[in-house]
Amino acid sequence: MNEDPYLDPIEELITTYNELNSSVIEELHEEPSPLEFMRFVAKNTPFVVRGGAASWKATQTWSPRFLAEHLGQEPVNVAVTPLGNADSPTLHEDGETLVFAKPWEEQQPFTDFLNYVIQQENDPSSLSQDAEVRYAQTQNDNLRDEYASLFSHVQPDIPFARIALQKPPEAINLWIGNWRSVTALHKDNYENIYVQILGQKHFVLLPPLCHPCVNERNLPPAHYKRTPDDNLKLEHEHGEADDDIPFATWDPDTPENSTTPYSKLARPVRVTLNPGDMLYLPALWYHKVSQSCLPEEGICVAVNYWYDMDFTGPLYPFSSFVRSVYKDK
Amino acid sequence: MNEDPYLDPIEELITTYNELNSSVIEELHEEPSPLEFMRFVAKNTPFVVRGGAASWKATQTWSPRFLAEHLGQEPVNVAVTPLGNADSPTLHEDGETLVFAKPWEEQQPFTDFLNYVIQQENDPSSLSQDAEVRYAQTQNDNLRDEYASLFSHVQPDIPFARIALQKPPEAINLWIGNWRSVTALHKDNYENIYVQILGQKHFVLLPPLCHPCVNERNLPPAHYKRTPDDNLKLEHEHGEADDDIPFATWDPDTPENSTTPYSKLARPVRVTLNPGDMLYLPALWYHKVSQSCLPEEGICVAVNYWYDMDFTGPLYPFSSFVRSVYKDK
């Protein structure tokens, strides 16, 4: 363990963590018991269960055709952006201001939405080059709300997590999109079980103490608005500076850009989920998520279970402390 | 949660922790399951099981007479100090230097040792006023070594801990002393299960992030030596400055002395163990331990189980980080 007295404390923190922890994710081949799961929670360390949801009805039966027949023209909430950049740091068209770009949200008949996503994935030349990107990504428990008719095809909760954490999931979310949508690096106050149904998700993960690596900046919020001539225009929200959103601006996939002096110390954990795979994404871990689809499907579908994290114990105060020390520098 | 932007990061850390965690220890009335235990390990939070070891043969049968008959005149290792200050910050007789005082260690026939401890507890006037203090406190797995003949009277391990932590205890230690011996505030790299057999132990506990409260100083090591005229003399160990021992010098029982600017933020957790009680003392927690005896017994006896802590995950790097940030100030 690093005891160089001249080492910067933040550098020492990240280096010590890297020395003691693997950046290769642990792979299980069956669901853990509640106790086995709790050991991972205790060390705030991710794992993947290969095929953990392989027998779910959703994994067995969902396909674009099945979903279209099942949901038909029911209206669903769709996030619309020009670049697949919902909730992402985005350069404003003034070319100078980095803003936090929220998507344009609208209701669309499900089949229309689905067909558009598939067409863009499989036959992009049939759309204009700057065609908008659509993503069903409301993180508001949508699988027990607007997609409730599909809910019986997944498990109502993740038993090992419910038993270990002694609580039901706070939200269960369905995600439907194509390769054009990327979820920018961010963290959540939740223990997260992420289940892949169709296509692949590619996760890049960083532990909470990597806060000094991710170049968090206070970004003024902005949102896309559909204009009368059917373009998407990014509009500032005119609020107080207090409304600025602290958000990571370093991207582990373009590690030379928007760096801090600590970015080079980050050792991202990378994992790709295939259909039926199940990921434990621990509370407060940074994650960037991109996706790819099978040509015969043209969509990527996943479900995730959010369990409220435990704010007792040292994890939350320690993570906030790293942030404060970094800010103070 | 405290978000005052002008708050010092260390002050914010301790304040946030205090707001989110109780300083009253959780009391159980039966042993936890491995999963229930792992939840406490995950939040690095102590608990006490009242009567958790009430049915152990040791709890049921040990008494001074029983121990004397069982061990007779077998030689045992005894730590001898003038003030019950083994392994404690101690003012050297030069009146200026605070040193880390190690005890004089010698072999004594068990019954002689036991009778002395009881006599000092129950009839102190029969001894001279500056009579030495004796304590059986070798933390070297002594219950499976010099006291091995007593080992079958306790459990060979703590099942809920062995199963949860997936390892046997690294050391099982027996402690025999009287009210004169106090273990100074310190921390260990172990998950610790502490079981009271005779008398009471009084614990004062502080979580790892209280490092900035405890006024750790680098103390030159010194050790007591029995002189030919049967006095105890504290002798410096003449080593390098590198040999200095970093040790807490703030005492939560005399909180006005040897303070740091953060000492006043500490919210010690206090718990007294009675015979048959079992304490989970999480890894890296500071603990000060004093003891009291029943008049009819005149000794205090306890057993503890040390399990190697898990250095993976964020706890160890975060705790070291607090230390580095504090040192840097």
Image: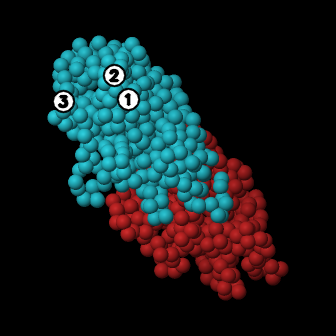
Chain colours: A red, B cyan
Q: Please give left or right for residue A48 compared with residue A118 in the image.
A: left
Q: Chain of mark 3?
A: B
How far apart are labels 3 and 1 at the CA level?
20 Å
Q: Nearer the viewer, residue A38 or A78?
A: A38
Residue drawn at x 20%, y 32% is B230
Q: Which mark is residue B107?
A: 3
How far apart are labels 2 and 1 at the CA level?
9 Å
Q: Which mark is residue B180?
A: 1
Percent x, y for residue A299? 59, 66
The amino acid beneath tag 3 is Gln
Q: Residues within 10 Å of mark 3 (few under 14, many from 20)?
A: few
The amino acid beneath tag 2 is Gln
Q: Are marks 3 and 1 in contact (CB under 8 Å)?
A: no
Percent x, y for residue B293? 41, 21
| Residue A190 position (above or below residue B200) | below
Q: Please give left or right for residue A102 compared with residue B37 in the image.
A: right
Q: Chain of mark 1?
A: B
Q: Nearer the viewer, residue B70 or A121?
A: B70
Q: Residue furthest bottom?
A: A95
Q: Earlier in the sequence, mark 3 or mark 2?
A: 3
The amino acid beneath tag 1 is Arg
Percent x, y for residue B163? 38, 35
Percent x, y for residue B88? 36, 42
| Residue A220 position (above or below residue B89) | below
Q: Nearer the viewer, residue B282 or B310?
A: B282
Local SS, label 3:
strand
